[in-house]
Amino acid sequence: HLRNNRFEGQIDFSMLPDTIETLEASENFLKGSVDLTKCPRSIQRIDLFTNRLSGTVTLNKSLNRLQHLFLGANQLHGTPDAKTFPVNIVLFSGADNKFHGEFPLSLLPKSLKVIQVQENMFDESLAVDLMSRRMEELSFFQNKFSGSLNLRKLPSCL
């Protein structure tokens, strides 16, 4: 674990060992974007919260072992592409960034149970009635969502 140090610079995911399962580099001074397209397929957990990441996030659908992705408390921007979320991801935490645009719940993998994207700038409508019935936690507060809200088909756990 590399957590809570003074590491700086960018992360080149292609340089990670082929057998790595966890990358824990939270609470540092890392910069740049998050490009998971060249991340080893062995990765199961990535913790990069509370850094100085400021670019975009490029996800990789083929990272079929990645279950937990923590990117909160950075300055990341853009719109995470729901179609490229890793197929078996369980938790996505992107809270306290500058993400914007639409967050299409219906396009996310069915494995996703926890979404934490509070304190961003998402500004489209939010179709909660189209999300997976397996969802356990949604944190969308302090964004700029608009439109009507259909609450009839919410999972019972919410």
Image: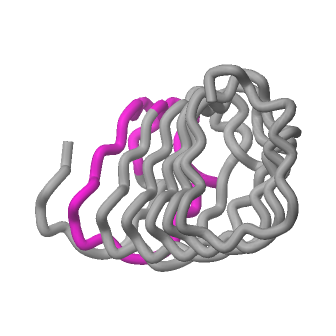
Query: 67 or 101: which is nearer to us?
Result: 101
Write the residue at 34% across / 75% down. Answer: 52
Q: Quadrant of residue 32?
A: bottom left
Magenta segment: 16-44
Q: What colour-coding does the image apply?
A: one colour
Labels in figure, total? 0
Q: Quadrant of residue 46?
A: top left
For the C terminus, the quadrant is top right
Q: Position of residue 54 (x, y in %)?
A: 46, 79
Front residue (pair 136, 15): 136
Would you say residue 30 sits in the magenta stretch?
A: yes
Report the residue at 72% width, 32% height from top: 87
State the residue in front, 132 or 110.
Answer: 132
Q: Is residue 90 magenta?
A: no
Q: Residue at x 38, y 72 (%)?
A: 10
- Residue at 19% across / 67% down in the picture? 7
Residue 58 is situated, as x and y percent measured from the top left of the image, at: 65, 61
Locate residue 136, reporting x and y percent.
59, 27
Residue in the foreground of this view, choosing between 60 and 89: 89
Does residue 138 sit above or below 4 in this rendering? above
Q: Residue furthest left?
A: 5
- Look at the image and tell me in which quarter the N terminus lies: top left
Up/down of 49 relative to 6, above or below = above
Q: Position of residue 5 (x, y in %)?
A: 12, 61
Viewed as shown, does residue 141 lie left or right of 154?
A: left
Q: Is residue 4 above or below residue 156?
A: below
